[in-house]
Amino acid sequence: MLKYQSPVKEETKEEIIKDFLPYIKYTAYRLSWKLPPHITLDDLISVGLMGLMDAVDRFEPGRVKLKTYAELRIRGAMIDELRATAWIPRSMRKKIDDINKAKIQLEKKTGKVPDEVEVAEFLKITIKEYYNTMQYATSSNPISLEDFKTIKYADSSLNISECIPDPKAKSPLSLLEEKDVKEGMALLINTLPEKEKLVLALYYYEELTMQEIGRVLKITESRVCQIHSQALSKLKTKVSK
């Protein structure tokens, strides 16, 4: 990514567009699953280009890097466009607006946030109709975890999706227990004769075959197997005590 300074000269804008175009296309493809039928991928790319030009015009050096600022404006412009063009029937928009206005009126009147039943009674609609309307409002405005990447973390790669724990990852407690087991096993192995410790180390840590260990220690493969079995048997006895 090239470095730019502000104010950006008009003749350099074409160079800037070429520089940011791969990011614009990449972002558009990443957001393309949200596209309503009447919006094309090219439309989203065009919106991204307009976001880039807006960033160039507004950029102030010293506060933040142009790359950081422009990428935020590009993504923000695309997301704003998707939200603004989310298609909702006019009748449904009116119902959503009525519910939102009712919430504000009731909150001003009672001094607290009204619940669903209070809003439905105020508008003289059924609670089922209230839920259906609000469900429509929510589903018509798709969002992604990536939308929550904020300017606070703009200079880093951190976003909220990275803060979600991996269900397959080991917990700190299990890692600690595993560490204790390994340390305990290491202490037990240290009590074995040198040749048995060496065979275990070559087999489990160096990942040599029994035949290769035999060549290293200059003994037969069958003798290596015998030493290996003796070592495991002793460890099993020590662990069971």
Image (cartoon, rainbow, N blue to C red):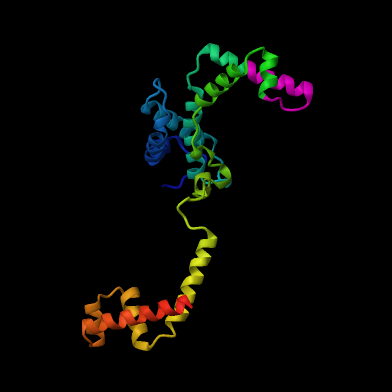
Q: Is residue 137 above or below residue 1?
A: above
Q: Magenta stretch: residue 107 in it?
A: yes
- Decide which of 112, 154 is in the foreground and name it: 112
State whether residue 115 is above or below residue 171: above
Viewer can see residue 52 = yes
Q: In this view, does 60 lie above or below 220?
A: above
Q: In which quarter of the image is residue 128?
A: top right
Question: Is 207 in the magenta?
Answer: no
x and y, in percent, of residue 130 in the image: 60, 19
Query: Residue 152 in the image: x percent, y percent?
Result: 58, 45
Tell me if 89 is positioned left or right of 223 in this view. Answer: right
Q: Give the magenta part as a residue range.
A: 98-115
- Residue 96 can be seen in this image: no
Q: Tally the marks.
A: 0
Which residue is depicted at the point 39% across and 26% down?
A: 43
At horizontal 25% and vertical 75% (from top left) the residue drawn is 209
Picture quadrant of residue 106: top right
